[in-house]
Image: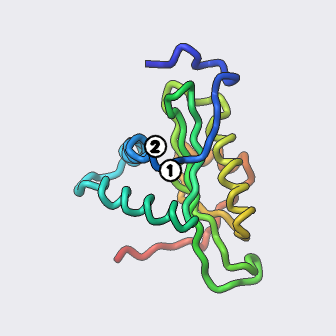
């Protein structure tokens, strides 16, 4: 199951997500959601395909991938949204982090940290004043170590 090169981070390469990667990317996204305990009551694949096609095309979604040879072993994603400017974010541009997933056989090797850094830099280049995430229990240590802080005011209303 683990690639023969797993354990040697020198063999891991990084590149941006391309259209040809979408089936694998979507499969990994669904695996991530299952791992986080999501209830599967619909086929999410068509909605994910539609989302990624549209937002990759207009530049409001970007992803970096980690690869061992040709095998995608890590994913990341950053959606760019805009809201009215406020004092701590005068551009009003926010990066929404998603799709952070590393194949279990490649965890604890610094891959997620590298992917996180690359998409955070994409948000900075886009002009975002902040990056937000709803972190899984597994991800909290990674994000805290990177410098993310909890925002106790975050609330959500389900429609």
Indicate whether 39 appears above or below 25: below
Indicate whether 20 appears above or below 135: above
Task: State the SS at label 1.
Answer: strand
Q: Residues within 10 Å of mark 2 (few under 14, many from 20)?
A: few
Q: Residue furthest top?
A: 4
In the figure, is residue 103 to the left or right of 84?
A: left
| Residue 86 image label | none
Residue at x 61% of width, y 81% of height: 83
In the rendered structure, which disc, 2 or 1, sits on the residue that comes first in sequence? 2
Q: Position of residue 50 (x, y in %)?
A: 37, 62
In the picture, which quadrant includes the N terminus? top left
Indicate whether 129 appears above or below 1: below
In the picture, which quadrant includes the C terminus? bottom left
Q: Nearer the viewer, residue 14 or 102?
A: 14
Alpha carbon distance from label 2 to label 1: 14 Å
Q: Position of residue 30 (x, y in %)?
A: 37, 46
Indicate whether 159 appears above or below 149: below
List the residue tagged with mark 2. 21
Residue at x 48% of width, y 19% of height: 2
Q: Nearer the viewer, residue 126 or 9?
A: 126
- Coloring scheme used: rainbow
Q: Residues within 10 Å of mark 1 (few under 14, many from 20)?
A: some
Residue at x 71% of width, y 84% of height: 86
Indicate which label's residue lies in the foreground, 2 or 1: 2
Badge count: 2
| Residue 99 image label | 1
Q: Position of residue 72 (x, y in %)?
A: 50, 34
Task: State the SS at label 2.
Answer: helix
Q: Nearer the viewer, residue 87 or 70?
A: 70
Which quadrant of the view contains residue 25? top left
């Amino acid at each position: 199951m683990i690639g023969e090169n797993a354990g040697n981070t020198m063999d891991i390469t990084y590149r941006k997500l391309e259209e040809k990667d979408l089936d694998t990317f979507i499969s990994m996204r669904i695996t991530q959601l299952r791992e986080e305990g999501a209830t599967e009551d619909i086929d999410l694949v068509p909605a994910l395909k539609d989302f990624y096609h549209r937002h990759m095309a207009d530049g409001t979604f970007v992803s970096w991938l980690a690869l061992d040879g040709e095998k995608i072993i890590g994913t990341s994603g950053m959606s760019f949204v805009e809201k009215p400017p406020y004092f701590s974010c005068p551009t009003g541009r926010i990066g929404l982090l998603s799709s952070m997933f590393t194949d279990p056989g490649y965890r604890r090797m610094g891959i997620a940290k590298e992917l996180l850094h690359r998409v955070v830099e994409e948000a900075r280049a886009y002009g975002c004043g902040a990056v937000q995430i709803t972190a899984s229990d597994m991800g909290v240590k990674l994000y805290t170590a990177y410098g993310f802080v909890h925002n106790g005011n975050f609330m959500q209303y389900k429609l």
